[in-house]
Amino acid sequence: MIHFERFKLENGLTVLFHKEASTPMAVVNLLYDVGARDESEEKTGFAHLFEHLMFGGSVNIPDFDGPLQAAGGESNAFTSNDITNYYDVLPAHNLDTALWLESDRMLSLAFTDKSLEVQRNVVIEEFKQRYLNQPYGDVWLELRPLAYTKHPYKWATIGKEIKHIEDAKMSDVKAFFKKHYHPSNCILCIIGNFELDYVKERVHHFFGSIPKAKKSARILPLEPAQDRFKSKTLVRNVPADAFYYAFKMPERKHPGYYFADLLSDIMGREKVSKMYVDLIKKQKLVSEINAYITGSMDEGLFIITGKLNEGKSFAELDKEIWKILAHYKTTLISKKELEQIKIKLRTARAFQDQGLLNRAMNLSFFELLGDANGINEEQEIYQSIHAEDLRTFANHLFAKKNGILLKVKKKKNA
Amino acid sequence: MLNRQVAPKLTPIKSIDFSVPEMYEIHAGIPLYWKNNIANETSKLELHFHAGTTIETPILASLTAGLLISGTKNKSAIQIQHALDAVGAYYDVSVSQEQAVVTLYALNSYLKQAFDIFHEAMTSAIFPEKEVQEICNERQEKLKVQLQKVNVLAQRKIQQVLFEETPYAQVISQGDYATVKRTKLIDFHQKHYLNGLAKVFLVGDLSSEEMHAIKAACADFAGKEYQPSACSFTGKTHIVHEEKTDALQSAIRIGKIMFNKTHPDFIAFSVMNTILGDYFGSRLMSNIREDKGYTYGIGSYMMENTHFGYFMIATEVAKEVREATIQEVKNELERLQTELVPEEELELVKSYLLGQLLKAADGPYAMLDLFSGVELHDMDMSFYNKYIKKIQEIKAEEIREMVCKHLDWKSLSIISVG
C-alpha cells in the first residue's frame, strides 16, 4: 500500500505527496498532460522537441541543470504519445532547489534562439540514432500510420519526419508552451522524508504565484472502427525478415486494457509460452517471438513480433500465428498458468515499487487517469481476472478485421 | 515576496553512513554477504562465478551462461521454467570479461524455493543438443542485427585494439557458432560453474535457516580459489576509421587502458572524468551536444576489472561532423591540461558527486552494490569515506595534473565506424 496525500493550489496545480521516511533523497516529479497526440499533423515531434527546450533555461534562471547538480541532484524527462514527464532526484535537504527550478520553468521559459537551434540539431541526431541508423529502427514510423488513419497516434513521438523538426519556429514554441505548460495541466508529485505541512508550505511558496490558465479541452480525431485486415511490406537492409502483427485494443481506462495486458504477458512468456514452444522449439520457424501492448491512453495496439529463421516464409508464419490466436480464442488458459502469471506480476510490482522514482511516476500517472489511488487497486484487478475473461476478450481482440501486419523483408544480397 | 532570481540556500553533504552486510563463509575464500531488514517483501540472490569471457573463449562463456537451466536428466527446460514461474521468480545471467553473474529475483517468501529449483537445474545440467542448437540459432540471429549497428562495431573494435594480444580482446564472431560442441559446454560448466563460485550476495528478509540452507547448497559450486591473472597490454595506440556506406551517423570510441580503484590517483581521476564527460553538464556534453548540436549524447567512462581499468569516450555523431567531433574532444582535453577548472564548476561537480553517492547508498540494494564495488578489490567501505574526503579537498591543480599525467592525446586510441 502506497500512502499519499493530495492537495490542490488555487491556480489548479494538483500536488501528491508520499512520505518515505527511510530515504535521504527526494523525488520531484511533474507530469504534464501533453504528448505527441496533442500535436497538429503538420508539426509533429513538437511535444518531444519541447521537452528538450525545457532544459534550455527559464525566465529567471539561465540554466536548469547547473543549479540542480550543484544541489547534488539530477534530472531527466521523457515524452510519449500521451504525456511529458519531468523528474528531479536530489538530496532531500535541497528540495527547495528542485521546486525553485521547476516552478520557474512552469512560469515561463527563456525562449532563446540558440537553445531552439541547438536542440533542433540534437533531436535530429536522436532521430537518426534511434530510428534511422538501426536495423528495424523505422518500424514504428511505418506501423503507426498503417494502424491509425485519423487518430494522432499515427505518428511517433519523435515526429513523422525530420523536416518537421527542422521547421520548428520560435512562435510555435511559445504557443505550445502557453497552451500546455501551466499549473492546471500538471500533476506534481513529491516523495521524501517530509511532513505534509512542510511540503504544502514549500509548494505554495514556489508554485502559488504562477498564474492560472484554463486547461484546454482535448478533442482528438476519432479513429474509425477498423473494418478490414491491413498489411504492408517494407524492404530494408536487415539481416532477417521480421513481422509485426498489431491488433487494436481498448483504451487505458477500459477494463479490457487489463485483459490485454495479462494476455500479452501470457503469450509473450519466454521459454514456455505456446508461441515460443510451437514456433521456436517445435517448428523452428522463428528465431525470436514476443508479445506486448503499447499501453497508451487511447485505443492502443497489442503487438506480436519476431524474426523469421532463414529460409522460412511469411506465409508459413501467418498460418501458424492464426492457429495460435485461434487457440486462445477457443481454449481456456489453465488455472496453473494463470496463477503463475499472477504471482510473477506480484513479484514484478514489488520490485517496481522499491524505486522512489517509479512510485512518483506511477502515482502521477494514476492521478492523470483519475485517481492516484489506482496504484493501490491495480493488483487486485489483475488478480481477479479469470481464464474465461481472457478467452472472451481474445475473441474480440484477434478478429481478423481488427488486425494489422507489417512485414520487414530482407533486401536481397544485403 | 519570492525573488525567483535568487537560488535557494544549499546544504552540503558532510558525511554519509555506510553499512556492511553480514558475512558468512561458504567455503575457504568464498563469502556469502547478506543484507536483511528490508522494508518490503522483495529479495535477490546473486551468484558470482569465475566464468567470464576471458577465462576461455567468449562463445563458450556466453552459451554456457545461456544454457544454465536448459534441462536435466529428469526435467526439460520448459519444466524448469514452469517451476520458477510457479514461485513468481525472475532470473538473469550476465557475462562480463571476468565474471558471470546469475541473479534471482523473488518475493522473500519464495526465494529459497526459487534457489532450490535453480540449484538442482544447474548442478544436474546436461546441455541437451537440441537446446544448444536453439540458442546458437537465436544468438546468431541477434548477432547479425548487432553487427549492423555502428556503436556495436566501434565498441568491438576498440576492445580489440586496447586489449590486443590478451584474452580481453576476444569478441564473438559469426563463425564461432559453427565451432560449438556440446561437450565443450559441459566441460566449461564443470570447470567454471560447478567449481567456479567466487561469491554470493543476498538481499532480503529470509529466515536465518533459509539463509544457512542457501549457503550450504552454494558449497556445491565451490572449487579452488581463483584470481584472474594479471596481463600486460601492448600500450600501442591505434587510429582506425571503418567506413560504413549506408550509415547516417558515425560511432566514435576514444580510449586507453587505465587503473582501477586500487590506484592512488583513482579518486582524483574520477572527479576529473566527471568534469570531462560523466554528467549532463560535462565539458563534452556542453560543447558537443549543447553548444554544437552534433550528437544526442556523449560521455566518458571508467570501467574496472580485477587488475586494471580502462577509460573510454563514446558517442554517435552526424557523419559529416566526425572529424570535427574528434577535434573538439582533443580541444577539451587540452583545455583541461592548460587551464584550471573554474572554482564554481569544481564546486558544482563536488556537490553533484556527493549527491550521487548519497543516492548510490540509498537503500539496501544500493548499499550492497556499493559494497560489491570495493569488495572486488579487497577493499572495505572506508574507501567511500576516503572518496568523500578527497572530493571535499581536491583542488583545480590536481584535476589539471590528472589530465596531463594520464590523458595525453597521443596515448589514446581512436576508433570510428560509419
Image (cartoon, coloured by chain):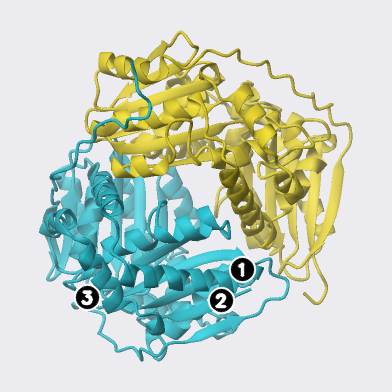
**Residue in front for this viewpoint, A344 or B130:** A344
Asked if residue B41 can be seen in this view, the reply is yes
**Which is nearer the N-term, disc 3 or disc 1?**
3
Q: Amino acid at mark 2?
A: Ser
Display colour for chain A: yellow
Q: Which mark is residue B321?
A: 1
Display colour for chain B: cyan
Q: Are marks 3 and 1 in contact (CB under 8 Å)?
A: no
Q: Which mark is residue B228?
A: none
- Which residue shows up at 79% across the image and 24% down it? A221
Q: Amino acid at mark 3?
A: Gly
From the viewer's perspective, is the residue at label 3 or at label 2 nearer? 2
Q: Which residue is mark 3?
A: B223
From the viewer's perspective, is the residue at label 3 or at label 1 nearer? 1
Instruction: Assess disc 1: are there few (<14), some (14-19) or many (≥20) residues with their C-alpha within 10 Å of its C-alpha.
Output: some
**Residue in front for this viewpoint, B133 or B162:** B162
Tell me the distance, in whole angstroms, between the alpha carbons under discs 2 and 1: 12 Å
**Which is nearer the N-term, disc 3 or disc 2?**
3
- Percent position of residue A218, x then y: 69, 19
Q: Amino acid at mark 1?
A: Val
Q: Quadrant of residue A112?
A: top right
* Label 3 element class: loop
Q: Quadrant of residue A101?
A: top left
